[in-house]
């Protein structure tokens, strides 16, 4: 399933994350509908992680300390650049993410886990009658609050999906200046796929 189809970020105000009660970052109705359109799969709940993957944060920080240019279009010589002060700010904010925790029951019919549990305990799959249900209903989403920079024109966001046997992990920069629901990244700071088997 394409990340840009699943990931919907709603930025209602720049103080959106001052209270988790105002949280509106992930469009659950759209996500549930996308599952239903994939083999007519209906899931009773949605899994997400309370925390962010510390290893991925460290990787993003390491990359930021080495470069200030990030590829915008894979294979093309088109880059997004950040200033030294932006780099220092982003690294500082990434370090804060290491201790950030989302609340339980952030969404209707949702269940929160810790990121480290995903690599240890893969017993999220219930006894579903079809392969599609086993795949779709055991997806676990991980995401950070946005880190805004350059006068709130851009945001750095952590986003990951964990399936039965692999994880797709991303730290992407989104242009949020004119669009409040960005679905495609402007540039990627860090991306990896991990095999969990």
Image (spheres, grey):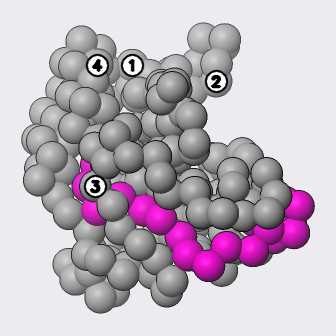
Q: Position of residue 29 (x, y in %)?
A: 66, 80
Residue that numbered label 4 is attached to: 63
Q: Nearer the viewer, residue 53 or 93?
A: 53
- Whether residue 98 sits left or right of residue 77 in the image: it is left
Mark found first going from the N terminus, 2 or 4: 4
CA distance for labels 2 and 3: 33 Å
Q: Is residue 64 above or below residue 1?
A: above
Q: Position of residue 176 (x, y in %)?
A: 48, 58
- Whether residue 7 sits left or right of residue 170 in the image: it is right
Of the numbered discs in the image, which one, if any, rests on residue 43? Answer: none
What residue is rendered at 41% in x and 72% in y?
111
CA distance for labels 2 and 4: 18 Å
CA distance for labels 1 and 2: 12 Å
Foreground disc of the pair 2, 3: 3
Residue that numbered label 1 is attached to: 69
| Badge 1 vs badge 2, beta-carbon distance below 8 Å | no
Q: Position of residue 182 (x, y in %)?
A: 58, 58
What residue is rendered at 79% in x and 63% in y?
129
Foreground disc of the pair 3, 1: 3
Foreground disc of the pair 3, 4: 3
Q: Which residues are magenta?
A: 34-52
Q: Position of residue 48 (x, y in %)?
A: 42, 62
Foreground disc of the pair 2, 4: 4
Residue that numbered label 3 is attached to: 114
Q: Is residue 126 visible?
A: yes
């Amino acid at each position: 399933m394409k990340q840009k189809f699943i990931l919907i970020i709603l930025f209602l105000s720049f103080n959106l994350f001052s209270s988790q009660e105002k949280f509106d970052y992930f469009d659950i109705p759209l996500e549930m509908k996308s599952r239903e359109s994939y083999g007519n799969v209906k899931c009773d709940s949605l899994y997400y992680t309370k925390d962010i993957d510390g290893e991925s944060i460290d990787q993003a920080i390491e990359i930021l300390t080495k470069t200030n240019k990030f590829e915008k279009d894979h294979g093309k010589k088109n880059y997004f650049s950040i200033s030294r002060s932006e780099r220092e700010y982003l690294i500082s904010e990434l370090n804060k993410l290491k201790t950030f925790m989302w609340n339980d029951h952030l969404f209707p019919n949702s269940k929160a886990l810790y990121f480290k549990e995903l690599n240890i305990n893969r017993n999220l799959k219930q006894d579903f009658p079809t392969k599609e249900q086993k795949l779709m209903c055991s997806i676990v989403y991980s995401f950070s609050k946005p880190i805004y920079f350059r006068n709130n024109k851009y945001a750095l966001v952590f986003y990951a999906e964990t399936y039965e046997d692999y994880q797709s992990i991303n730290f992407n920069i989104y242009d949020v200046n004119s669009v409040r629901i960005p679905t495609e990244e402007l540039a990627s700071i860090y991306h990896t796929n991990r095999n969990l088997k």
